[in-house]
Amino acid sequence: MGNKKEKMVLLALLIGSGVLALLAGTGVYLLQRKSSELEIANQSLKSRVAKAQTKIAKLGELRLQRESADRRLIVAERILPSQEEVENLVDNLSEFAIESGIIISEAKPALRAALAGRGVVKKFHEATFSLALVGDFFQFVEFINKLENYKRFIRVDEFSIKSGTTGGSALSIGLNFATFTYVDSSPSKGGK
């Protein structure tokens, strides 16, 4: 075979080809590994995009629910009396009694906080009333009807009816009811 120089060129060519093949193999391995990592990252991003699209699809429904809740709150604020209207209710009770023919022999108003519990923000004050009434059954029914048809929210908690002590048709009636006032918990504009 040829001379020493040809053998050296051939050996160098062989070694160069081996190194080149080794580099090519390493390059292919690294590209495949990087491709695999990118595929995993791509799948992760696709999953996150799908979850985000699901959440975005729910936004419309959530907005409608929030708007509905806002409308219900406006209605609730409108039907719940202010503190001034609660004071006017006492005057209206006298009118209801006169119109129904029943006699209010005793009235005990009391103001207490409603919805005060662990971690619950007070949104309403509950104004409770205890009345002692004297009259016949039909007068009581008419009085209750006027009370329950009052323009603001009234909750009758309890009533009791006993026969009167005078022996006539008059009954001794106990009535407990409540109304609520909305507490505006928004920060004051000149607040500290």
Image: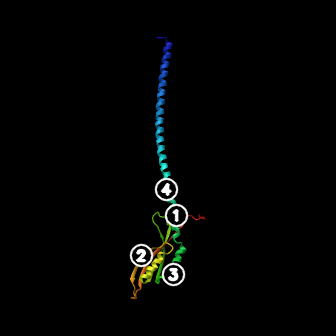
Kind of residue at badge 1: Arg
Dot 1: element: helix
Measured in 3D between alpha carbons, the distance from the residue under mark 3 to the one under mark 1, in whole angstroms, is 33 Å
Q: Nearer the viewer, mark 2 or mark 4?
A: 4
**Picture residue at 53% right of the left edge, 77% below the top:** 88
Q: Position of residue 16 (x, y in %)?
A: 49, 21
**Residue placed under numbered mark 1 in the picture:** 71
Q: Nearer the viewer, mark 3 or mark 2?
A: 3
- Counting residues from the start of the chain, the first of labels 1 and 2 encountered is 1
Kind of residue at badge 2: Glu
**Residue placed under numbered mark 3 in the picture:** 95
**Residue placed under numbered mark 2 in the picture:** 158
**Placement of 181 over or under 161, stated as above or below:** above
Measured in 3D between alpha carbons, the distance from the residue under mark 1 to the one under mark 2, in whole angstroms, is 31 Å
**Placement of 60 over or under 46, stated as above or below:** below
Kind of residue at badge 3: Glu
**Placement of 7 over or under 83, stated as above or below:** above
Dot 2: element: strand
**Picture residue at 44% right of the left edge, 76% below the top:** 176
Dot 3: element: helix
**Residue placed under numbered mark 4 in the picture:** 61
- Counting residues from the start of the chain, the first of labels 3 and 4 encountered is 4
> Mark number for residue 187?
none
